[in-house]
Structures are given as structure tokens and as C-alpha cells.
Amino acid sequence: MTAAIPALTEMPSPQYVMSADGRRIATYTWGDEDAPTVLCVHGFASSCRDNWVMTGWVRDLTRAGFRVLGVDQRGHGASDKPHEASAFGMDALVDDLVTVLDTYLLDTVHYAGYSLGARVGWQVAVQVPDRIDRAVLGGIPDGRPLARLQIEQARAYAEHGTPVEDKVTWNYCTLAERVPGNDLRALVALAEGMRLGDSDPDPANPPLQPILFATGSEDAILERSKLLADATPNGTFVELPDRHHFNAPGSRVFRQAAVEFFGAV
């Protein structure tokens, strides 16, 4: 069955998948059900719509013959938004995606992730390598920037409107509030939860699948992203001209490189 390709900004109704700990995870699909599937996972304080639909990824991937399976990670979009840091460990984020693949009866998929979604994708590719055959990881690593957020200041702002003094923390709060429907308390809990384990990707234990790394030329994490690509046995790297961390998903160079990497059908 072939589904109609929606307009760039059109979202289908979410289909909910229940996580192992009882959270509703919103998922969306586009394209032919029998086509190779690309699992698209967005970044911190974003959503499937913001990261993949509005930027043209769904359009370009479906036109190239792929089925797209998009996810709102817990704490984002139409998914449940718990306020407890314990709900946001890396294992929970990985388990959510494995549950999504199981629910859709998908043994193996291509993976596209940006920022937090790339960090989670690295971990999925390492922990359950048989489920990811190749991956595009944009704007990785993500763990260290979240660690710079001042949790107490962000929480005080989210709960009481207390002014934020730390510039980095204020930037993250502003980022979180720009997306309609975001719950700042849930996103603060996510940032805190990411500190409960080792949130940074481990270059000593890289994924072994073919991985395309992509980072903006104006992104502060550019050199660290290159180091991760160098540490990955089947890793390649593309630099996105004149892009910083927050506008890189809209790069045409990024989209074209990903479609070529996945292999147009």
C-alpha cells in the first residue's frame, strides 16, 4: 500500500506505542509500507515535525523511495512528558526505540538522528546492532552540552518564573519554549536524567555499522564530531557549510548526503 506524500508541514495523526514503563510514545509514518524504512529521531527540545517535516527530510526521503517512521521522544511532541529525572536515562530512550521497532514489526532499519537523537542512535547501534543497518548521526555528541545546563536555575524558571542568570541555561530555556507544546519541566527533567549515567558517546566502543556523521561548520562541537567519526571503523564525515547546531537540520547538503548514503531506491 502506498500512502500519499503529505504537504511539507502536514502531520498525520500520531500512532501511540506503549513503552516498557508505561509511557505513550507518539509515532508517525509516511510512504510505502513495503519500502526500506528510515527511523527518524529528533533532538533535544524539538519534535518529529520540527526536526524532520518542516525541514524537508520527510519529503526528500519519501521521494527517494523510503518509508519514514518518525518518533517524538519521551518528553517531546505528542509523547508523554514525565517530570521525573529517573524517567529519562539513556536506557529508557534506547528501549523506547526498540519497542517502536518491535511494535511496527521491523527487524532492521536505517536510522537518522540529530543532536540528542543522534546520541541515542549511537547507543542503539552499539547495544542492538542487528536492528540498525546504517545510520546518519547529525550534531553529535550531545551529552556534554546538556551537562552545562544549570538544573536548579532551569527548574526555578520552569516552576516559578525565576529569572535565569546563566547564559547557557537561558539559551536552552529559550530553545525549549520556541516549540509549541513543549513542557519545560519535562525537558529540565530530561537534562537531569541524562546525568544519571554516562551521557557522552564512547569512542572506545563505537558502532560498527556504516555511519555518516554530519555537523555544521559553525557548530562548537565540530571537532569532537570529527573525532567520533575517526574513531568509528565504518564512519564517514560531512561538514555542513555555514550551519550551526540549531539550523543544521535544514541544510540541503545534509539531506542530500543522507539520501545518497541510505541509497536511493
Image (spheres, helix red, strand yellow):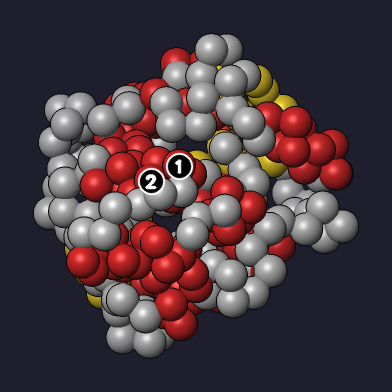
Q: Position of residue 24 (x, y in %)?
A: 26, 74
The quarter holding residue 27 reads bottom left
63 over 101 or under it: above or below: above
Residue at 51% x, 31% y is 245
Q: Nearer the viewer, residue 198 or 15?
A: 198
**Labelled pair 2, 1 in contact (Cβ < 8 Å):** yes
Q: Find residue 170 and name its label.
A: 2
Q: Position of residue 137 (x, y in %)?
A: 59, 41
- Residue 127 placement, left or right of 82: right
Residue type of the residue flagged with mark 1: Lys
- Residue 220 placement, left or right of 189: right
Residue at 58% x, 58% y is 147
Disc 2, SS: helix
Q: Position of residue 123 (x, y in %)?
A: 64, 62
Q: Position of residue 14 (x, y in %)?
A: 18, 58
Q: Nearer the viewer, residue 131 or 44?
A: 44
- Residue 248 placement, left or right of 143: left
Q: Nearer the viewer, residue 133 or 196?
A: 196
User: Can you name the residue that lies furthest to the bottom here?
Assistant: 21
The answer to whether residue 251 is visible is yes
The answer to whether residue 104 is visible is no
Report crowding for label 1: few under 14, some 14 to 19, many 20 or more residues within 10 A (C-alpha).
Answer: few
Q: Find residue 78 and name its label.
A: none
Report crowding for label 2: few under 14, some 14 to 19, many 20 or more residues within 10 A (C-alpha).
Answer: some
The quarter holding residue 232 reads top right
Disc 1, SS: helix
Q: Nearer the viewer, residue 92 or 82?
A: 82
Q: Find residue 167 and name its label.
A: 1
